[in-house]
Image: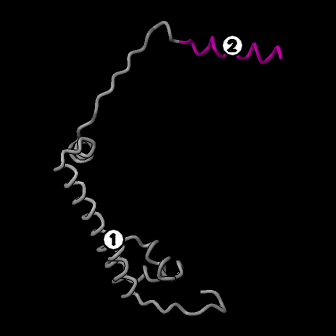
Amino acid sequence: MKAGTTKCKVTQKEFLEKLTEYRGNAYRTYTELGVPYSLYLKWREDPKFEEELQKARTKLIEFAENKLDDLIEAGNEKMIKFLLATKGGYTEKKEVTLNSTNVVDINTALDEIRSELSTE
């Protein structure tokens, strides 16, 4: 903390309790509690604090997975496709067909550009 500022009165335990309430959102937690970012980083050097931080973040992932499950059970096609693409290895196949009349010879195009630039 900078000289002349008051000392942070929030404990690691209080921070971690609020972090759990905010589902692992550290930024929201230290901002709303008034914990300086530098102190938050110092706390992260403590292995026990870091472990609890990771547990809170895991809870966020589990929460999101439960919401995804709810959407899939409700028949949300976008979420079904998302799950299949990210966990099932499925992808949508896109085919591109080129028409030979649209093919441009890059060397010819560059020569034309150079010619235009040299006449200006």
Q: Position of residue 55 (x, y in %)?
A: 29, 74
Identify whether 76 is placed above or below 120: below
Give residue 7's quadrant in the image: bottom right
The coloring applied to the image is: one colour
- Marks 2/1 in contact by CB < 8 Å: the verdict is no
Q: Which mark is residue 111?
A: 2
Q: Which kind of residue does numbered mark 1 sit on?
A: Arg
Give residue 24's quadrant in the image: bottom left
Identify whether 72 is placed above or below 24: above
Q: Quadrant of the N terminus?
A: bottom right
Residue labelled with disc 1: 23
Q: Which kind of residue does numbered mark 2 sit on?
A: Asp
What residue do we see at 18% from left, 45% from top?
Answer: 75
Q: Residue furthest right?
A: 120
Magenta extent: 104-120
Q: Nearest the camera: 63 or 51?
A: 63
Lower position in the chain sequence, tag 2 or tag 1: 1
